[in-house]
Image (cartoon, rainbow, N blue to C red):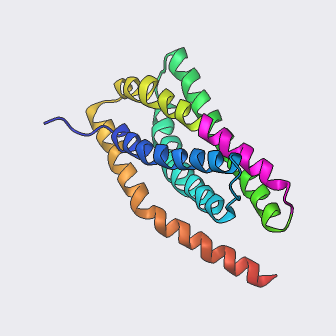
Amino acid sequence: MRKMMPVGPLMIEHRLIERMIAEIGNEADRVEKGGKPDPAFTDVAADFIRFYADECHHGKEEDILFRELGKKNLSPEDERIMRDLVADHAKGRTVTKKMVEANQRYRDGDESAFATVLDCMKQLRDFYPAHIEKEDRHFFQPAMHYFTEDEREEMLQEGFEYDRSLIHRRYQNVVKDAEVRNLR
């Protein structure tokens, strides 16, 4: 019986990310056709990208897979792709942060800020499919050849533990933020 590779769960997570990115694209199209901007949808989309796509998914890529690949003698091409993927993650964070800030300005009455929200939505819609394809088709599977079966199993288990503890880390931070806010 063939064991699951540590990139298996990451590729499964990509399917959910693709679905949300499609909805972000649908929202951008709806607004461009004259629909009223929906700041609540933007909040949900930003939360999904920040928590699921970035903290959960990219967290496992960077904190487990890329960390372990950093210990290997990668080919120059694989090193380049890995650096590109890390830069992609940073770009996604930057665009999402910009979208969140513009959405808040829109909520505060700056009607013109939604143009920035819309631009960010379109950037995310265009960015994520190419990023996911780069990982799924050009990096994840070839990267597994650097690892022994035991190393792959250890990373897979570490990924499962990362997921199990994620919700606790998230809400510990929510409480810490609330405590800091109340100390002011």
**Residue 60 visible (yes or no):** no
Looking at this view, name the residue that lies furthest to the left. Answer: 1
Q: Is residue 30 above or below residue 184?
A: above
Looking at this view, name the residue that lies furthest to the front. Answer: 34
Residue 136: percent from left, percent from top:
43, 30
Task: Say whether residue 21 is left or right of residue 35.
Answer: left
Question: Can you tell which quarter of the image residue 172 is in?
Answer: bottom right
Residue 121: percent from left, percent from top:
66, 46
Magenta part mainly helix, strand or loop?
Answer: helix
Residue 100: percent from left, percent from top:
72, 57
Residue at the location (45% across, 38% down)? 65
Residue at the location (33% across, 49% down)? 157
Task: Say whether residue 77 is left or right of residue 102.
Answer: left
114 magenta-colored:
yes
153 or 4: nearer the eye? 4
Looking at this view, name the residue that lies furthest to the top. Answer: 76
Quadrant for the C terminus in the image = bottom right
Question: Can you tell which quarter of the image residue 85 is in?
Answer: top right
Residue at the location (85% across, 67% down)? 109
Quadrant for the N terminus in the image = top left
Residue at the location (48% across, 46% down)? 17
132 magenta-colored:
no
Q: Which residues are magenta?
A: 110-126
Residue 37: percent from left, percent from top:
70, 58
Q: Is residue 45 above or below residue 57?
A: below
Q: Is residue 177 above or below residue 151?
A: below
Q: How many marks?
A: 0
Q: Is residue 44 above or below residue 125?
A: below
105 or 158: nearer the eye? 105
